[in-house]
Image (cartoon, rainbow, N blue to C red):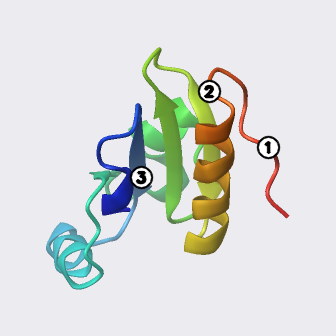
């Protein structure tokens, strides 16, 4: 995801591991470079889950410069995320095309 660091959107992750220290360890091991927020051990009843309608883990959002959520992904599918980001960059100002 580092190749998108200068692009006009943010990737934001939401996680709900039981142990914050374990989450930090996994972020380092997996080289997660995007912002990732810990929802606490409450799962889908945590504050971020309730506010952002998170129903699975990990959940990633792509947010444009206007603060609009352009894409939401549940699960870790880097190929699908790459395809969606390519679609988003090819059509600025438009919703990302569905990824199959």
Residue 34, image quadrant:
bottom left
Q: Nearer the viewer, mark 3 or mark 1?
A: 1
Q: CA distance from mark 2 to mark 3?
A: 25 Å
Q: Is residue 5 left or right of residue 25?
A: right
Q: Residue 46, percent across and down?
A: 43, 45
Q: Name the foreground residue: 59 vs 43.
A: 59
Residue underneath mark 3:
14
Q: Residue at left 55%, top 21%?
A: 68
SS under mark 3: strand
In the picture shown, does residue 27 fall above or below 69?
below
Q: CA distance from mark 3 to mark 1?
A: 22 Å
Residue underneath mark 2:
92
Residue underneath mark 1:
97
Q: Is residue 54 left or right of residue 35?
A: right
Q: CA distance from mark 1 to mark 2?
A: 11 Å
Which quadrant would the N terminus be assigned to in this image?
bottom left
Q: Residue furthest top?
A: 66
Q: Earlier in the sequence, mark 3 or mark 1?
A: 3
Q: Nearer the viewer, mark 1 or mark 2?
A: 2
SS under mark 1: loop
User: Would you call the spot at circle 2 few (<14 residues within 10 Å), some (14-19), or many (20 or more)?
Assistant: few
User: Would you call the spot at circle 3 few (<14 residues within 10 Å), some (14-19), or many (20 or more)?
Assistant: many
Residue 70, image quadrant:
top right
In the picture shown, does residue 36 fall above or below 51?
below
Q: Residue 79, percent across and down?
A: 62, 72
SS under mark 2: loop
Q: Residue at left 50%, top 64%?
A: 58
Which quadrant would the C terminus be assigned to in this image?
bottom right
Query: Label 3 near label 2: C-beta < 8 Å?
Result: no
Query: Label 1 near label 3: C-beta < 8 Å?
Result: no
Q: Residue 24, percent across and down?
A: 17, 71
């Amino acid at each position: 995801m580092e190749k998108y660091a200068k692009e006009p959107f943010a990737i934001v992750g939401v996680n709900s591991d039981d142990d914050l220290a374990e989450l930090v360890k996994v972020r380092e091991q997996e080289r997660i470079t995007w912002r990732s927020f810990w929802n606490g051990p409450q799962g889908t009843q945590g504050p971020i889950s309730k506010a952002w309608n998170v129903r699975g883990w990990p959940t990633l959002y792509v947010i444009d410069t206007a603060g609009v959520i352009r894409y939401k992904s549940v699960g870790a599918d880097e190929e699908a995320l790459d395809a969606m980001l390519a679609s988003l960059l090819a059509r600025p100002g438009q919703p990302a095309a569905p990824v199959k």
